[in-house]
Amino acid sequence: LTERVHELIEEKLGRRCCTLAIDLDPILILRARENNNSKFNITYDVVDVSDVQFLAAAKRFLETIGRVKFDITFLFSITMWIHLNRGDEGLESSLSSVSTISKALVVEPQPWRCYRAAVRRMKRSGAPPFEMFDKLRSRSGVEDDIVVFLETRCHMRKVFETSRTSWGRKLIIFKEVLGDAVQRLPT
């Protein structure tokens, strides 16, 4: 998916792009590095987007390409996992961190039914439950809560929302809102 999205963006822009692809699973990152087609300028790194290390890793990458912000950041199928493992504050902190270094943001939030399914899977597998689940304030309206948070607290504006996929998910695209010229750093 990463290579295909990278390729599509380069085709649409008509220029080479640099991509930072992160995941917290070192095995997935190792596989991605091994299978990385050399024609793509993609860097794969093991980073937890909900961890404080994320911003430092992202800023290091941006510095190597002479940028201050990413033109676009994708959060595919990750908001639920952050929410279940880091709680409401962890989700908000992660969204806030990502938005500070993104000109545009594409979020694929999982609906509440996905949370319930994840909890059932954990229970059936005998794994420990998600500690934060019972403490979550944001529940059945989690998708709307993410939109409200990004728009009111992160200086982002929703510009597009897709229809739901067969999995019941949608993509929501946000763009940074610039209050004045001082906020925009040259790239």
Image (spheres, rainbow, N blue to C red):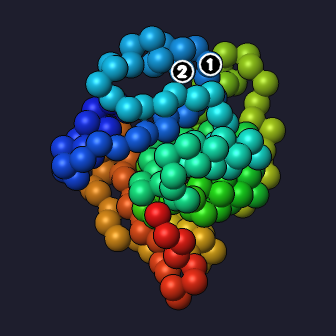
Q: Is residue 142 visible?
A: no
Quadrant into which the N terminus falls: top left
Q: Residue furthest bottom?
A: 180
Which amino acid lies under the numbered mark 1 shown in the image of this protein? Pro
Residue 6 occupies quadrant: top left
Q: Which of 108 and 183 lies nearest the eye of the viewer?
A: 183
Q: Residue at x 55, y 59 (%)?
A: 68
Q: Please name the residue that numbered disc 1 is placed on.
A: 26
Q: Residue at x 63, y 74 (%)?
A: 153
Q: Please name the residue that numbered disc 2 is placed on.
A: 29
For label 1, the SS is: helix
Q: Position of residue 172 (x, y in %)?
A: 39, 59
Q: Position of residue 2 (x, y in %)?
A: 37, 32
Q: Which of 20 and 119 lies nearest the eye of the viewer?
A: 20
Residue 23 occupies quadrant: top right
- The answer to the question of whether label 2 and label 1 lie on touching residues, with beta carbons closer than 8 A, is yes
Q: Considering only vertical position in the picture, is 126 above or below 88?
A: above
Q: Which of 164 and 106 lies nearest the eye of the viewer?
A: 106
Q: Residue at x 33, y 62 (%)?
A: 161
Side (left or right) of 17 relative to 74: left
